[in-house]
Amino acid sequence: MKSQSLISSLNPANEPDSLDSFERAEIDASTKLPVLLFFGSAIFWLLVGSVLGLVSAWKMTHPGLLDGEAWLTFGRLRPAHLNTVIYGWASAAGIGVGIWLTARLCRVVLMHSKLLIAAAIFWNLGVFVGILGILAGDSRSIEWLEFPGYATPILFVSYAFIGIWTIIMFRYRRPGHVYVSQWYLFAAFLWFPWLYATANILLTWQPIQGSAQAAVNWWFAHNVLGLWFAPIGLASAYYMIPKVIGRPVHSYYLSILGFWSLALFYSWNGMHHLIGGPFPAWMVSASVVASIMMFIPVVTVAINHHMTMRGHFGALKWSPTLRFTVFGAMTYTLVSLQGSSMAIPSWNTFIHFTDHTIGHAHLGLYGFFTMIMFGAIYYIVPRLVGWEWPSANMIRWHFWLSAVGISIMVIALTIGGILQGFAFYDPTVSFRSSLDYATPFRIVRGLSGFLLLGGHIVFAVLFTQMVLRIGQIKEGPALFAKPSESQKEGVAV
Amino acid sequence: MNRLPLIFLGVFLTFASSWVGLVAYPYLTLGQMQPLPDEDTGGYFPPSMPGLAVAGQSVYASSGCVYCHSQQVRLAPLSTDIQKGLGPRQTVARDYLRAQPAFLGTMRTGPDLSNIGVRQPDANWHHQHLYEPKTVTDWSVMPSFRFLYKMQKIEGQPSDDAVKGLRGPHAPPPGYEVVPTDDATALVAYLLSLKRNFPLPESPEPKLE
């Protein structure tokens, strides 16, 4: 163990890493099958979802594309895209990362892996049945909850297994410090089933009446982002950034503030999707206030991550994990501040119903969450399969295709959406103009989709090579560049 | 923060607060709202939906119309929905009592449909438009819903419900006709039922300058 100063020994954020490298490798190995199952299926759904998204995007400017068939109509492909990427890709990747982090941070060998393997099978079955249900015309057309009532119970079964497993792992964890990533994971794994159960009971199984549905709908949809994806993404960033650069998180107290303010404010955000809608004013106002208050957790986390990284930004040159993770963490700050501003009523009513919101959603789910998942997968998989990524060049392609692709997409939709907003607001401008304004930007968005799909294909090829252990035996990890000796010290790539 | 029970309690309470405020409260208020009796006619506001329109609502859901068409009219001065002719007044909770689900919508890639039954009361127009949107609006980006229609040979007299006015490349070949399926008939009945122009005390019609 390294010698520490008196101050840093007393700092609760620093604690003796009680695992030696042998124990750590043993824990990693125990997570192999379930984590690879979740990652592998997630990447499969990512490819499916990208194609569905791409076709939907081009249909918005070229309605004649693949039309005339019920299952290929825009109104089914679009929800199929959304649900594929939300449940098939993002949730499954997040669960995979969550399982691995939980085992590492509980500091025990993964127990009852059969529960997780069953969960992975049920999860994929649920997504598969759900997507087919949407394409077959059984969609409920409630955004983020389109899966028909016969698909969601399958996801519940899967989720129940994961929940039971999480509780077992926490019970048998090695005593000691509970790291910040664990708070987030613990909360996310508790919040999600509650959210999903409430929304499915009140909207799909025993639907409630009238506009109360929309309130529950957006309470759910925004909390899936805020209380499921965001905590998992932050848990991963809080783990990967310090790990790669080899220094502890800047401030333990900022971590606490960030966590509790997120829990309190994010859960109240949903009604900002319904400003001007048929609801009591106080509900909308409460959500607007909560959305603005999101400044606190967001800025807190941003400062904490930035101060942790300070002096180590050079590591972005060589570490794939860090580059994806930091891209995601910075986007989290950007997308959250944008989200807070979008809740201001006068601006909200202006850009509501436009592509602006679609840009914002992709910035969050892709720029932030998906990029962080990519970074985590680049870190985790070599530790599971005992093989190094075969090509740093291909990782570089993946990074730039994804980073440039999502940037072009978000910029195009953001600007196009504002122009659409002008057309909707000005009573002298015809409806047709709103389409004319949006169309060129939608075409650019369609083109950016090809970049993202390209990046995902590269990623899928790399992952397949890893699982099958194809390629040359490498001495060290696949890095973008050679780190200088001083940087490499105490570093886990 | 090493005490899991405390973390659990905090995580539970913060989330429960929003569950009470944004789920339980609307369930107990908006979810239990009743239609208003109309003393002049003995009917109700909003009027009950014909059975065919209820069936059409499901076609609307399964076809995903909501991804391009909103159904809400917001109030001035934050929005100009009323000046733009989307409806005579703001839509309020009572307007959606019979909607299952309530298709408030989040996009206006196509026009708002809160009052499409008022703006376009002609069933044949809707059939023409659904079969091939470009026959009524040449710049439309709406997809064709011709899978809701049957092209069939005319046996004797043309069918009463055959879609009229299909011209140019979208016209059926001579001796053939386009007839709506039950789904198309139901969907149009639903669209024609979309009228949020009845008076409600909680949403007076604003005076426009």
Image: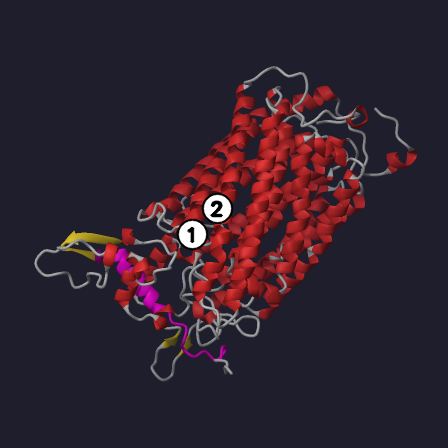
In the depicted view, which residue is nearer to us: A51 or A18?
A51
| Disc 1, SS | helix
Left or right: where A144 falls relative to B45 = right
Name the colour scheme: secondary structure
The x, y position of residue B12, in whole percent, is 65, 50
Q: Is residue A243 above or below residue A65?
A: above
Q: Amino acid at mark 2?
A: Gly
Q: What residue is shown at x 63% (from left), y 33% (from top)? A: A376
Q: Residue B180 magenta-drawn?
A: yes
The chain letter under disc 1 is A
Q: Which residue is mark 1?
A: A61
The x, y position of residue A437, in whole percent, is 49, 59
User: In which quadrant is the C terminus of chain A drawn?
Assistant: top right
The chain letter under disc 2 is A
Q: Residue B29 magenta-drawn?
A: no
Q: Is the residue marked by circle 1 packed among few (<14), some (14-19), or many (20+) residues within 10 Å?
A: many
Q: Is the residue marked by circle 2 packed among few (<14), some (14-19), or many (20+) residues within 10 Å?
A: many
The part of the image, by quadrant, that contains residue A315 is top right
Q: What residue is shown at x 32% (from left), y 68% (from top)? A: B192
Q: Which residue is mark 2?
A: A446
The magenta span reads B179-204
Q: Verify CB contact (< 8 Å) between mark 2 and mark 1.
A: yes
Q: Is residue A386 above or below residue A227?
A: above
Q: What residue is shown at x 50% (from left), y 66% (from top)? A: A424
Left or right: where A249 falls relative to B24 = right
The x, y position of residue A38, in whole percent, is 54, 32
